[in-house]
Structures are given as structure tokens and as C-alpha cells.
Amino acid sequence: MIESASIIVTGMKCGGCETTVKNTVQALDGVLLVNASSKNDQVDVEFDDSKISLDDIKTSIANAGFNVK
């Protein structure tokens, strides 16, 4: 089933940080769409929950060096 979620992520300071988060999450199997906003400290994601969990997505963001709320 396709799910969507907004994740609060702190530590993104610029467009480069947004790109890092987007590329990290987009590389995960099951992720369909990612938008990251350093201005809003938010990452919006659409994903197939039969392939990946929201916790796995959050973990990948944290492993990239950002704080997930």
C-alpha cells in the first residue's frame, strides 16, 4: 500500500543538505517520492509500505547525519 509521511528533520542547513537527504532516501527500495525542505525542517516521502517501513526511512536519514524527530 502506498503511504505518505512528513518527517521532522533538523540539521539540514542548505540546498546541499536537502540534496543529500533526498538522494539517500530516494535510493531506498520502495520509496516513490521525496521532498526535503531545510527551511521547514521537513522531509515528505511517499513509499510502498510492503517494501520499506517508515522506521527504515528515518534510520537512513539519521545515518546520513541528520536528526530525526
Image: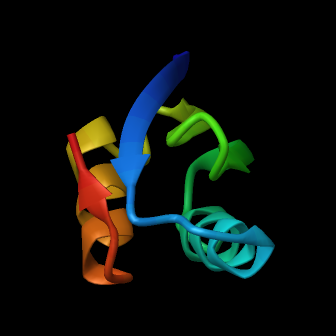
Instruction: State the residue in front, 10 or 63.
Output: 10
Task: Judge whether 26 appears above or below 1 on screen.
Answer: below
Q: Which residue is drawn at the image coordinates 74% and 73% (left, top)?
A: 19
Q: Which residue is drawn at the image coordinates 31% and 38% (left, top)?
A: 54
* Residue 32, position as x, y percentages in the image: 72, 44
Instruction: State the residue in front, 22 or 31.
Output: 22
Task: Identify the colour scheme used.
Answer: rainbow
> Residue 49: in sight, yes or no?
no
Across the whole image, how many numbered discs are drawn on residues?
Answer: 0
Task: Judge whether 68 appears above or below 12 on screen.
Answer: above
Judge left or right: residue 42 versus residue 46: left
Q: Which residue is drawn at the image coordinates 54% and 34% (left, top)?
A: 48
* Residue 39, position as x, y percentages in the image: 66, 43
Judge left or right: residue 52 versus residue 13: left
Q: Quadrant of residue 40?
A: top right
Q: Identify the image quadrant of the C terminus.
A: top left
> Residue 8: in sight, yes or no?
yes
Q: Which residue is drawn at the image coordinates 51% and 42% (left, top)?
A: 41
* Residue 52, position as x, y percentages in the image: 38, 47
Task: Judge whether 37 appears above or below 14 on screen.
Answer: above
Instruction: State the residue in front, 52 or 12.
Output: 12
